Image: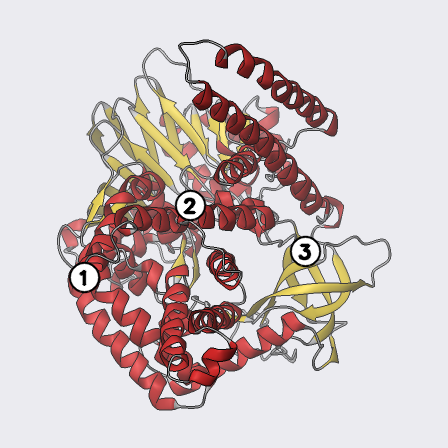
Amino acid sequence: MVVIALGFVAGAWMLQQQASLPMLSQLLFMGTMVVMLIAAIPFLQQRFCNRSFFNQHAFALLFTRLTYFIFATALGFTWAWGIANLRLSDALPSDWEQKTITISGVVATLPEQTERGQRFLFDVEHVLTPHAQLPKHISLNIYAPYNASPKLVSTIQVPQVQVGERWQWSVRLKRPHGVVNPHGFDFEGWALAENIRAMGTVRLKSGTKKLAEHVTHPAYWVENMRANIAERIDKTLAGQPYAGVIRALVIGEDSQISQTDWDIYLRTGTNHLMSISGLHITMLSGLMFAIVYWIWRRFPALLMHLPAKKAAAIGGMLTAMTYAAMAGFSIPTQRTLYMLMTVTLMLLLNRPIAISRMLAIALLVVVFLDPWAVNAAGFWLSFGAVIVIAFATGARIGQIHWFTAAVKAQWAVTLGLLPCLVMMFGQFSIVSPIANAIAIPIISFLVVPLAILGSLIPIEIALYLSHTFLSITMIMLDWLAALPYATWQQSAPSTSILLLAMLGVVCLLLSVVVQTAHHRMLYDAGTRFNAQSDAGGRIVVPYLLAEGIQSLSAMVLSHDDLDHSGGMASVANQLPVGWLMSSLKPDAILFQQPPFDYWSDQKKLQCHAGQYWHWDAVKFEVLYPPIERLQDENTKDNDKSCVIKMTTRYGSLLLTGDIERSAELSLLAQQSEQLSSDVMVVPHHGSKTSSSIGFIEAVNPTYVVMTNGYLNRFGHPKPLIQQRYVNAGTMVYRSDYDGAIQFLFQADQPLAPVAWRKAFPKYWHDRYP
């Protein structure tokens, strides 16, 4: 069983590494090769096993297991191929992107509250627009109308939808599209695994009507239960600092946990504890097992009908299923549930099972039902943790004290998973063993049981007690996270590259990392998504840490627009920064936020034409804005953008921010001889207000990068502007089509940009010209 499970998982994993799905003819050819290989194994077995100097039994066993492994690998590959084809076939055609379509269906999940509305999954039942083709499962947003003037009052009513309601409305959809960055989160792969096949917004102006208050279906009943629990928690713990964590521990919805708290959990290695995880389900199931076992043994009449151990196993299993249902049967909870179901079934059938066989069955079931599980770090870490614990304590658990066993298990997990954690996340929490030793018992045996009790039964004191114990735990975790060496970062990569530029986009994110031999500079940090999340924390910082960049020599903020400045504070809060250069005024709102509010004035510089510095044979020049424009109240923020040119012996790069035609004319008049560059980031995302013909001719770039979000509401880049660069003989890269663009300026090497989406494709990534 172990060999078969490993082979099946290996086959599914191999399929997930493909840049494109094999055609049926290719699959049949590979299947024929596998059959021929398996058919050849008996001949090899006979040839080798008949030699006197070989152990015949060992070789017979080896060849038998090799046969099983090859067959299981082929089966896993084929199964994953079939499921992937089926899932990909249920996609939104490109021709129907951003078109208004009228549909009806059911709100399938608990709506998540956002700053301007709600986000939820929707099951499409009927498509009312003729000839329109839609996938069955989509993600929708309902936004409150945006008024440019606070004096305007919208007459459009924004419905507050509830799970299980049937609605008819008009929507505009697009295919799932994410940033493809080095070390970044693969949103398109995640959406495929979650069966989210289109995303969009509800058009409230017409066609919106509620068709049914509640649709009867087991899945919607479970989601309704979760909604009621969430409402009870929000009402009881209103205003409490860790109400969002309690909500995450009970129903698995962690959107209300603050970024500050997440940073503490990451630094202490306890982030796995702060939402429903396999550990919590196992602990709670084990607690119920112990309670039922203790009670059952005290009633002889019950023992006559069912042994205490079997009754306890059933009680533990039902508890695990209930808790998993409260989490909406999320993928991580399903893995643990399958494992516990395997143990329970073997116990009820009076069939003792080795831990290796139990894990093999659970592994096989998980990957069979979800072939994309092999892409998730949690999949490997959860199974890896169980294997490490079993190896460290399994043979001795009945012979040593429970406390010693617990300590050994904690250290085994900490040390055993260290290589995986460093490889996957580029960092490791040094205080994790201490933090987990404190947090695991409190969270698993006090916080979670009390929170569930107070959520299922209207006992408010249970929720208050749960929050109190969590608050005490947070005091200790906060102290540990504040220690200078709480985390260990992976060592920095080679510094032989003179200049490294990375550009990635989410919405209208522009972020450029400039890396010389001994210095690192960040130009802009992207947008703010909501009060809890921004591109700086979600995209820029993970990239920097994964590259081994633990501090920044400088940050440059081109101007005050949110799509450029929204992530700056997150980056500065998590990494030491030498100084910040920007076009902002000293009293700008950004400078009133931490950590900038306590920075000295010497660390906050204002950019203006004429400034320059040298780092490792790389010259940095500020070409714009002139001081008089910077001080002119009538000059738009876009036209105050810091324009910086970087020059090496092997090429040059021009960063232009959001300058418009007026700023371009100023540059042509005052800096025309300095504009020529090999690479340029196109001004203002390719807007029609920028990229004048004279400016393009003066820069004369070999390559340009247009930073824009996929199907953004502004229509950037404008086709006319893109064509101007093409007509000028320039190679055009688009961050929505190409992902991150990497330029390496180095000796004896031609400038060869690497487009991340094209260089590292996956079969689920959309392809663009």
Quarter in which the C terminus is drawn: top right
Q: Residue at x 26, y 29 (%)?
A: 516
Image position of 541 (left or right of 638):
left
Q: Nearer the viewer, mark 3 or mark 2?
A: 2
Query: Label 3: how many residues lie within 10 Å, few (<14), some (14-19) or many (20+)?
Result: many
Amino acid type of the residue tagged 1 in the rendering = His
Amino acid type of the residue tagged 2 in the rendering = Ser
Image position of 722 (left or right of 50):
right
First of labels 3, 2 by sequence position: 3
The residue singled out by tag 1 in the image is: 401
The residue singled out by tag 2 in the image is: 356
Q: Is residue 50 above or below residue 378?
A: above
- Residue 673 seen in the figure: no
Number of labelled discs? 3
Query: Label 2: how many residues lie within 10 Å, few (<14), some (14-19) or many (20+)?
Result: some
First of labels 1, 3 by sequence position: 3
Residue at the far right: name it.
Answer: 130
Q: Residue at x 65, y 32 (%)?
A: 21
Q: Is residue 505 above or below residue 319?
A: above
| Element class at badge 2 | helix
Quadrant in the picture for residue 458: bottom left
| In-front residue for pair 483/8 | 8
The residue singled out by tag 3 in the image is: 173
Q: Position of residue 507 (x, y in %)?
A: 51, 51
| In-front residue for pair 173/50 | 50
| Element class at badge 3 | strand
Measure the alpha-carbon separation of dots 1 and 3. 59 Å
